[in-house]
Image (tube, rainbow, N blue to C red):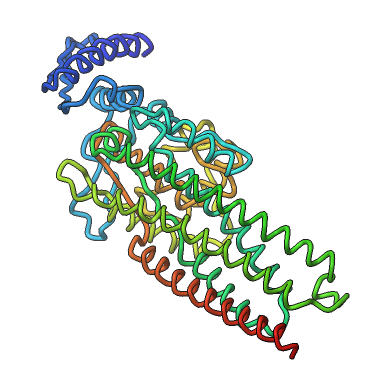
Amino acid sequence: CWAQIELCSAFLCGTVQCVRQASAAGRETQCCRAAERGREGEALVKVRMRTKTVSSTVLGSAGIRYFYSVCFVRLFGPTGLQDEGDQDGFPEIQASPPPSPFLSAILAAFQPVAYDDEEDAWRCHVNQMLSDTDGSSAVYTFHVFSRLFKSMQRKFGFITHSSVRFLGERLQRMGNQFLSSLEVMTSHSQCPTVLLDAETLVSCGLLETLKFSVLELQEHLDTYNGKREAAEEWLENCRKTFGDKDCNQGPNTQAQELELCRRLYKLHFQLLLLFQAYCKLISHVDTIKREAEVTNMSEELAILESCLKQAESGVDGQEDVGVSDASQTSTETAIQSLIETLRARDFSSALTQVKTFRSLWPNDIFGNESDNAVQTLLHIYFRHQTLGQTGCLAVVGPSRDLSQASGRLMELNLQIREALSQTQACQTTVVSTGL
């Protein structure tokens, strides 16, 4: 077995060199090599790879990684993974996955480095993006930002609720408007799942657009953090001066409450700008789904997501299903078990397995406890179905709802701004007249 692997490695090294030369010249190349000699005779393995007119810089580490996966699938893997005639709309996985070490390694290659703090992970990603030439870092952007945005939403909800509880009766109407804005931001503004490969990202001209978008998001994030600190500082000073409202330690002045509302409004508005910038980035990704050379798997993944979410809603009230010991021996057997479970449409069991595998291999290709199990399964399924292929893309999530949520947030922000202006005008009138 190891002798065959060494022979294939030599074959791959030579073939990659040929592809690089052909890619630089913008030609189509066919690479034929004798890949294996067994006792029963000689088998000729033909690997055909159509290359586009791209520079040798584009075919960097990511391109080589994908080319290796192509070769491994040609040498070892199955063909025809999907059943296009499936009546339920969810394509069935016909064959077993390729030899487990290869799928596990490729999945690991698409797993971002784990950080304790989501913002640290994002800043590290931004620094890597600036020097990215082959898309190998850019493919992580959507996953890393999605986790960051979820973390921001949790903190955003905490400071909004804390501030609204501190407001007096005169400003409770404005407080309710803040809560309405919070509800839209947390319940209807979820980042869609975006899955694609580095070569597709580069060949469709999305890399430079993505770099600019990342810098724009970072600028909005820095501004947001400054406004968040200002709001938190003012709320803390109000508590120290007047005491917590729930404790009734002292009267709150309307001027202090109004300033708290102003700072909270700026915070809400800045998070809206950040959200709109990400919506604009998603719209750029949506445009490449219509290109002829791109295989759009969005509908397929959306059906799987729907099945998994339906199963997830029923798992909470059921006892955990046991996971076989054989699937827990290594990450490779665990992945194969998940794929076979999805093939059998046992979605509840697949969700249970993910939780078990996370406890065995924390912060690995199965994610951690804070990650959504449905998203993890979508990721694994997509990489399995596209193993050895390029030009595949999936955007799973209600992109139309994003624009609707953005419009609703703009409407609420304008209402809060108008309420602030009216309240400030009334306060100015009271001060000037002494009434």
Return the x and y of residue 113 as percentages of the image width and height: 53, 33
Return the x and y of residue 302 as percentages of the image width and height: 33, 57
Occupied quadrant, residue 345? bottom left
* Left or right: 395, with 159 as reference point: left
* Left or right: 259, with 374 as reference point: right
- Residue farthest to the right? 249
Front residue (pair 273, 435): 435
Return the x and y of residue 275 as percentages of the image width and height: 45, 57
Occupied quadrant, residue 48? top left
Q: Is residue 431 above or below residue 155?
A: below
**One can see residue 236 in this view:** yes
Q: Residue at x 27, y 37 (%)?
A: 200
Q: How many marks?
A: 0
**One can see residue 352 in this view:** no
Return the x and y of residue 295 as percentages of the image width and height: 21, 44
Q: Residue at x 30, y 50 (%)?
A: 284
Q: Is residue 414 above or below residue 314?
A: below
Front residue (pair 402, 299): 402
Q: Is residue 432 above or below residue 163?
A: below
Q: Residue at x 18, y 53 (%)?
A: 85
- Residue farthest to the bottom? 435
Q: Residue at x 57, y 45 (%)?
A: 356
Identify the image quadrant of the C terminus. Answer: bottom right
* Left or right: 424, with 375 as reference point: right
Front residue (pair 355, 177): 177
- Residue farthest to the front? 432
Identify the image quadrant of the N terminus. Answer: top left
